[in-house]
Amino acid sequence: MRIKDLHYTKNPSGIIELGGVLEIDINQMFLLSLGRLDKQTLRLNLKADHREVTAYVRSKNLEEEHFLDFLQQELNKNFIGKSYNEIVNIDFES
């Protein structure tokens, strides 16, 4: 299963002054940390161009909730510092 099989933030963005939105290349976003907001939502804290941005991965059913459990452990263990693009495209065997 991949993150792309779930609901996820396609292009996290940072807020710039005057209420504008800054789009950042997902290849230039790197995972700093992550945590669960609730049993159906995983929050990814990313570093991008001297800014911190947030992405979310959400499950739609019980099977996907179990995958989020696996995903949280796997990302914490092996993907801190990896690019968001790499993370959303990897096929995790669980």
Image (cartoon, rainbow, N blue to C red):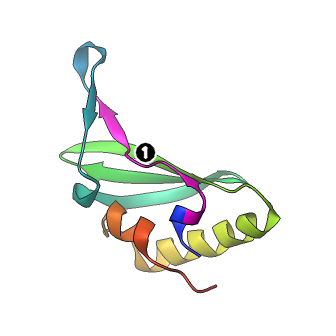
Q: Secondary structure at mark 1?
A: strand
Q: Residues within 10 Å of mark 1 (few under 14, many from 20)?
A: some
**Residue hosting label 1:** 54
> Residue 78, image x and y in percent?
42, 80
User: Residue 19: x, y in percent?
Assistant: 31, 16
From the viewer's perspective, is 22 left or right of 71?
Answer: left
Q: Quadrant of residue 52?
A: top left
Question: For the view shown, which residue lies furthest in the bottom direction?
Answer: 93
Residue in the picture at 50% in, 58% down? 34
Residue at left offset 25%, top offset 32%:
22
Query: What residue is shown at x 24% (from left), y 19% (from top)?
Result: 17
First to last magenta residue range: 5-15
Q: Residue furthest front?
A: 5
Q: Nearer the viewer, residue 93 or 71?
A: 93
Identify the residue at the far left of this view: 49
Amino acid identity at mark 1: Thr
Task: Please say if 80 is above or below 60.
Answer: below
Is residue 42 located in the magenta-colored stretch of the structure? no
Q: Which residue is located at x 44 percent, y 76 percent?
A: 90
Query: Which quarter of the rendered picture does the N terminus lie within?
Result: bottom right
Q: Quadrant of residue 14?
A: top left
Image position of 10 with respect to 18: above or below? below
Q: Position of residue 79 (x, y in %)?
A: 40, 74
Q: Nearer the viewer, residue 43 or 92?
A: 92
Is residue 7 inside the magenta stretch? yes
